[in-house]
Amino acid sequence: MQYLPNILFAIALVLGIGYFTKNVKKLIRNIKLGNEVDASDNTSQRWKNVVNIALGQSKMVRRPVSGLLHVIVYVGFIIINIEVLEIIIDGLFGTHRIGLKILPTSVYGFLIGSFEVLACLVFISVIIFWIRRNVLKLARFWKSEMTSWPKNDGNIILYFEMVLMTLFLVMNATDLEFQALNSGNIVSQYIAPWFSSLSETALHTIERTAWWLHILGILIFLNYLYFSKHLHILLAFPNVYFGRIKPQGEFNNLEAVTNEVKMMMDPNADPFATPAEGAEEEVPAKFGASDVQDLNRIQLLNAYTCTECGRCTSECPANQTGKKLSPRKIMMDTRDRLEEVGKNIDSNKGEFKDDGKQLLDDYITREELWACTSCNACVEACPVSINPLSIILEMRRYLVMEQSAAPAELNNMMTNIENNGAPWPYNQMDRLNWAND
Amino acid sequence: MSETLKVPTMAEYMSQGKQPEVLFWVGCAGSFDDRAKKITKAFVKLLHKANVEFAVLGTEESCTGDPAKRAGNEFLFQMQAVTNIEVLNAYEVKKIVTACPHCFNTIKNEYPELGGNYEVMHHTQFLKTLLNEGRLTVEGGKFKGKRITFHDPCYLGRANNIYEAPRQLIEKLEAELVEMKNCKRNGLCCGAGGAQMFKEPESGEKDVNVERTEQALETKPEIVAAGCPFCNTMLTDGMKAKEREEVQVMDVAELIANADDL
């Protein structure tokens, strides 16, 4: 019986990590539904971006208030998690504060002391985040896409963090042995007196309960990630690595189109030539994207990485002037549809069965797509290098090249370019007339 | 006004067996739009003043394909691109300058993969080089002490990280350069990019160009400087909408040419 807690702990750990691993595999499978994309270039620049943008939070702090608060929570999160190591060892081997047995008291005290200070700062930051969302009602948290689940999700994460930090501090405050050391209890020494009237047994019960809830809370939070916008704490790093290296103004050239254009321009090409051996099987390329499988893997990773902060939307000229387009919604829709496709595959033995839906129209409307000015403000604003514009462009390509469904005025513009080499109906032969006006 | 500018073409250079120092890519707006044609002429006057041997493609120039590409018509874009690249490569063009950030971005970033490799400069960068090399001098003239705010074109700024060249030129005019609350990498679009220039905007509360014009007016400028013919149109329309037409919208090249009464 004396090993019961150890066994329970091991079971909780295996279940927690096992279920999370299962979902990570699903996530990777879903991302691989997208087209392959070559990102083997500029390795050193990519690592630099990971260091500066992801680890260094360089784009987060462009907005100083939320940036600073975020840095506190981020640093706190990473450093306090060192404590989890001790909890796991203690839990598995039935020890209590193994760190004290390995490290000199002063070093252990310094570590736990730093964790306590950070926990306190994280708690305060999270409260401010909550106030910004729910009391000050910052506009970007109250856009039309931020209702129901996305809104609750944001708050649940904040409550999680508040509870976890509280449990950590209470656990330390009710640990008589630890308080007696009087090293490292920088914050908890002020909480300990709240419990001073309780018996030693009661204190021990509270300490154990806080300890168990803390580690179970962490495991639950880990598994909550997959269902939440909070995946960015893991995916921000690969996402920044795969982020854009080229100038933002450069849009990719479609290779399938290049091949066709080259053929059209080649005077030696025989339009009646029979296709080469084996070429007959080839399915003609689909131009642009109408569903998530037409996007590339980086775009799908982008969708899972988005934490719905809305900086993109608040910088978007279309959104600022009341149009329906919201770059954040483009990312949220892409993820929602991808999840739907993933579930479809799960319930149909690994095969996607047509569900009569697609990303275009069922999630993202044409009105949203045509409101974009391609100004790159959303791309510039994203703290983790997400590119909503690339998805908008792919979907416009589908509308124009597969469906010929551009707005009439744009069709006029394109006809003019085709006929006169200018977007307006002027004659190409008049192109130098300005010199003599 | 029937003043005739000397504008040599690549074909003329070719017939003399010569190469100009730089090809001036005029662009569709610069060729056909009445307002933008003035920018084109101002820039040509500056090129003459600095004794730059330049040429244009004239009737052999065609749309770069930018608006088609941003609208999603990759076919039309690549047809335009490949045709233009054939012409440019036939003339062995090495260096291109243009007063349109859309042409600039497209030729600089999207043509290389299709076989068009050139050194491409925006006209503000080119003018700055001329100043640095002492080939062109700028004095404040009539813009000395004037309050001027610069609107960053998206395809020059965010798209290609060029923020300083136009500002340094304005400072050379001894003008008072004031910044809008959204400037440089946070600059707000004029509303014309992504082929929006050629269609009515989707319904909303306001037009983007009016929003941007309001931001410009907050700086209480005498002149709003632009570096893109489309931004110029959008902001000029914005001033009309706000009934503030006394605030002039001018291209940086026009400012420099006018300072000198060219």
Image: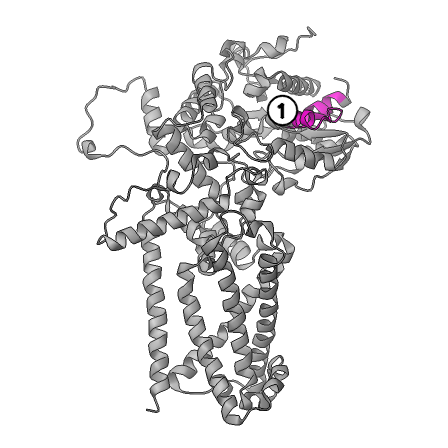
Q: Is residue B243 magenta?
A: yes
Which residue is most to the left? A277
Q: Which residue is mark 1?
A: B233
Q: A35 and B205: which one is in front?
A: B205
Q: A160 and A110: which one is in front?
A: A160
Q: A317 and A425: which one is in front?
A: A317
Which range is magenta? Answer: B235-258
Instruction: Please provide percent x and percent y for residue A365.
Output: 43, 38
Instruction: Please provide percent x and percent y for residue B152.
Output: 64, 35
- In the image, taking residue A160 as reference, residue B126 lies left or right, namely right
* Residue pictured at 39% horizontal, 50% vertical: A336
Chain that bears disc 1: B
Residue type, numbered disc 1: Thr
| Quarter occupied by the C terminus of chain B | top right
Instruction: Please provide percent x and percent y for residue A364.
Output: 42, 40
* Residue pictured at 35% horizontal, 44% vertical: A292
- In the image, is residue A175 above or below residue B48? below
Q: Image quadrant of residue A35?
A: top left
* Residue pictured at 51% horizontal, 28% vertical: B195
Which residue is most to the top? B2
Q: Is residue A311 magenta?
A: no
| Quarter occupied by the N terminus of chain B | top right
Count every numbered label the image shows and give the total: 1
Q: Image quadrant of residue B49?
A: top right
- In the image, is residue A317 above or below residue A91? above
Crowding at label 1, few (<14), some or many (≥20) Cα neighbours within 10 Å?
A: many
- In the image, is residue B140 above or below residue A16? above
- In the image, taking residue A115 as reference, residue B238 lies left or right, namely right
Q: Secondary structure at mark 1?
A: helix
